Image: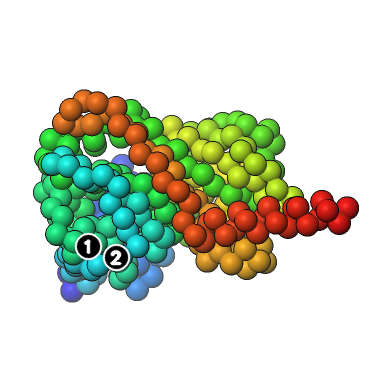
């Protein structure tokens, strides 16, 4: 068990406990919330919750159990396919149920673990548990990811993603019909005020821009093509839910469970269909595409079949 006792500085006056611990001790917001929930945060002798406010000059006492280092465990993932591979990069088509890299609280397979099991090397740049990772997809989202194999590729791709020079195109099936059918959602995203594992459109969040276009409209849902201008965690899911059109199957952000069950979906209908960027070695513009996996294609087929049946009956 580790502990710290320190005065609360003026700069954190009024800050939430979890946000303050993140700045003072370098915790993640989620870990800070776990410490508070376990009774490990005391302000002026009184236990504090993650959402309590700090006050300048108060005495903060924090006690916590250090987390063990996260390591990459080689685990084969037969469903993960390698789309492209050279000395600088490897492009994979990630199935749902696989995280990009290991993390505390995730005990399932990872892209890095699958690559290690298959004998691929990745860049050593970045944190050890994220070696070569330059962007991520949610565990429940399928589709294309690029992983850096060389150090020059890691540097170049991190810069390209930061500078928004990478083309990322997703397809999503959302509930209902967005109005207008084509548009842009420009709304800041930050941590959900009441759920640390979720995100939301919040004042003071990070600037977030999503462009969408309706490809096909069904009676109960719409198939959208989505271009991300920014790359926030859960961005598409949060933005579409904020418009009352959550991704079908996305229970975390309010999807209708009856529709998900009818389509036999156990995760959000969201797929990274296209990825394009300047190759970090040759400088050539390269582009990769991915077909829908079986579960998402089945959902589309059911939506179409239902519409055709109702049209025929009518």
Alpha carbon distance from label 1 to label 2: 8 Å
Query: Would residue 139 appear left or right of 236 to someone viewing this image?
Result: left
Write the residue at 23% across / 31% down. 279
Q: Is disc 2 placed on a helix, strand or loop?
A: loop
Query: Would residue 239 appear left or right of 204 to someone viewing this image?
Result: right
Q: Is residue 81 above or below residue 41?
A: above
| Number of other residues with Cα within 10 Å of mark 2, as a class: few under 14, some 14 to 19, many 20 or more | some
- Residue 298 visible, this orientation: yes
Q: Position of residue 24 (x, y in %)?
A: 24, 51
Q: Closest to the observer: 38 or 222?
A: 222
Q: Position of residue 110 (x, y in %)?
A: 28, 61
Q: Position of residue 114 (x, y in %)?
A: 24, 62
Residue 50 tag number:
none
Quadrant of the rendered image containing residue 155: top left
The chosen color scheme is rainbow
Give the label, 1 or 2, closer to the camera.
2
Instruction: Check disc 1 and report the residue beneath it.
Output: 113
Instruction: Check disc 2 and report the residue beneath it.
Output: 77
Q: Closest to the observer: 236 or 192?
A: 236
Q: Closest to the observer: 160 or 115?
A: 115
Q: Are marks 1 and 2 in contact (CB under 8 Å)?
A: yes
Q: Position of residue 65 (x, y in %)?
A: 22, 72
Q: Closest to the observer: 58 or 229?
A: 229
Write the residue at 42% across / 54% down. 142
Q: Earlier in the sequence, mark 1 or mark 2?
A: 2
Q: Is disc 1 placed on a helix, strand or loop?
A: helix
Write the residue at 23% across / 68% down. 75
Q: Is residue 278 above or below residue 99?
A: above
Write the residue at 59% across / 67% down. 264
Q: Is residue 4 above or below residue 304?
A: below
């Amino acid at each position: 068990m580790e502990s710290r006792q320190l005065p609360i500085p003026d700069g954190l006056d009024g800050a939430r406990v979890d946000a303050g611990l993140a700045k003072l001790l370098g915790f993640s917001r989620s870990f800070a919330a776990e410490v508070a929930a376990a009774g490990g945060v005391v302000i002026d002798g009184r236990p504090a919750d993650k959402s309590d406010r700090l006050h300048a000059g108060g005495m903060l006492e924090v006690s916590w159990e250090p987390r063990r280092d996260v390591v990459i465990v080689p685990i084969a993932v037969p469903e993960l396919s390698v789309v492209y591979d050279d000395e600088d990069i490897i492009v994979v088509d990630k199935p749902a149920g696989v995280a990009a890299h290991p993390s505390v609280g995730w005990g399932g397979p990872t892209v890095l673990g699958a690559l290690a099991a298959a004998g691929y090397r990745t860049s050593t740049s970045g944190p050890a548990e994220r070696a070569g990772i330059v962007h991520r997809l949610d565990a429940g989202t399928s589709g294309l990811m690029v992983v850096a194999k060389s150090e020059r590729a890691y540097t170049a791709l991190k810069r390209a993603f930061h500078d928004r020079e990478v083309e990322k195109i997703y397809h999503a099936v959302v509930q209902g019909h967005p109005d207008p059918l084509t548009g842009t959602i420009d709304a800041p995203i930050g941590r959900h005020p009441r759920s640390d594992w979720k995100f939301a459109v919040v004042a003071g969040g990070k600037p977030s821009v999503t462009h969408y276009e309706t490809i096909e409209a069904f009676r109960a849902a719409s198939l959208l093509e989505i271009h991300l201008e920014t790359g926030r965690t859960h961005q598409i899911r949060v933005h579409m839910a904020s418009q009352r059109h959550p991704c079908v199957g996305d229970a975390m952000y309010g999807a209708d469970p009856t529709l998900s069950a009818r389509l036999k979906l156990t995760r959000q209908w969201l797929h990274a269909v296209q990825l394009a960027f300047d190759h970090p070695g040759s400088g050539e513009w390269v582009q990769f595409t991915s077909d829908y996996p079986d579960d998402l294609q089945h959902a589309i087929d059911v939506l179409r079949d239902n519409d055709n049946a109702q049209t025929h009956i009518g």
